[in-house]
Amino acid sequence: MFKKYKNIVKKQVPTRPEQLWVSDITYIKTQYGHNYLALVTDAYSKKIMGYKLDNHMRTSLCKDALAMAIKNRKYKDKKLIHHTDRGFQYCNPKYTEFAENNNITISMTEQYDPYENAVAERINRTLKEEYELKQTIKNTDIARDMTHQAVYIYNNLRTHFSLNLRKPEEVHLNPNIKYKSYRKKSVNLPELKI
């Protein structure tokens, strides 16, 4: 049975890598129709932990991205929350049971408000606008190659203002690095506790 989960990370900020992962799906245009890109991003370091691009939006697309993220974990002994919207892929028991069987706590948006999953939405936009994934790409194979290259550059070479001009991979591997939050200073949000 499909299940909706509560938003347990609302108005909280992560304090370490692999404390909170966020996910979303975006579309990539090809000459043969739309492809879909599922991403799993670490909310603290902004590192893309897992991704999958294919010509469908089935649950397996998101599950494969999550499986890659799990394989790429560095802090496997730490508790982890995975936050998504309430898309049917994320509510599917094949997805939720897979996450829970890997000791991941599930959180979901409660409204249809993109701000409840803002980090994931921002990553989608950045990849499409900065790495030419917004254009119409010839076919799925080329889209996969471009996505792989974009994720590599994003994680390892691109600096972020929100990370004090550090790279996601660097922040992910050095959790004691303090950086400023992307949120407005007037908003004093509590730290995520897990």
Image (tube, rainbow, N blue to C red):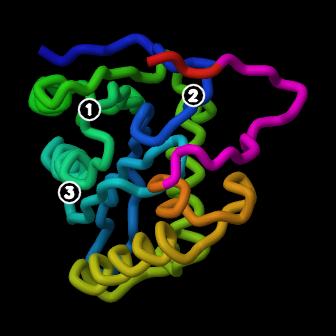
Is 68 on the left or on the right of 133, as rendered?
A: left
Using a 10 Å C-alpha cutoff, classify the residue at mark 1 as few (fewer than 14 neighbours), some (14 to 19) or many (20 or more). few
Determine the main secondary structure of the stretch shown in magenta: loop
Q: Nearer the viewer, mark 3 or mark 1?
A: 1
Q: How far apart are marks 2 and 1 (CA)?
A: 27 Å
Q: Is mark 1 on a helix, strand or loop?
A: loop
**Chain part drawn in magenta:** 174-190
Query: Could you tell me which quadrant the C terminus lies in?
Result: top left
Confirm whether the magenta stretch covers residue 51: no
Q: Mark 2 points at which residue?
A: 116
Q: Mark 3 points at which residue?
A: 56
User: Which of the two residues, 118 or 154, is positioned nearer the viewer here?
Assistant: 154
Is 193 on the left or on the right of 163, as rendered?
A: left
Q: Answer with mark 2 or mark 1, whichever residue precedes in sequence.
A: 1
Q: Which amino acid does label 2 sit on?
A: Glu
Seen in the picture, residue 32 relative to 23 is either above or below; the reply is: below
Q: Which of marks 2 and 1 is in front?
A: 1
Q: Distance between the residues labelled 3 and 2?
A: 25 Å
Q: Nearer the viewer, mark 3 or mark 2?
A: 2
Q: Where is residue 99 in the image (x, y as percent from the top left)?
A: 19, 30
Seen in the picture, residue 62 relative to 110 is either above or below; the reply is: below
Q: Where is residue 186 in the image (x, y as percent from the top left)?
A: 89, 26
Q: Is mark 2 on a helix, strand or loop?
A: helix
Q: Is mark 3 on a helix, strand or loop?
A: loop
Are the residues flagged by discs 3 and 2 in contact, CB closer than 8 Å? no
Q: Name the residue under label 1.
A: 77
Residue at x 29%, y 66% (from the top left corner) = 35
Residue at x 57%, y 32% (from the top left corner) = 15
Residue at x 45%, y 55% (from the top left corner) = 173
Q: Distance between the residues labelled 3 and 1?
A: 33 Å
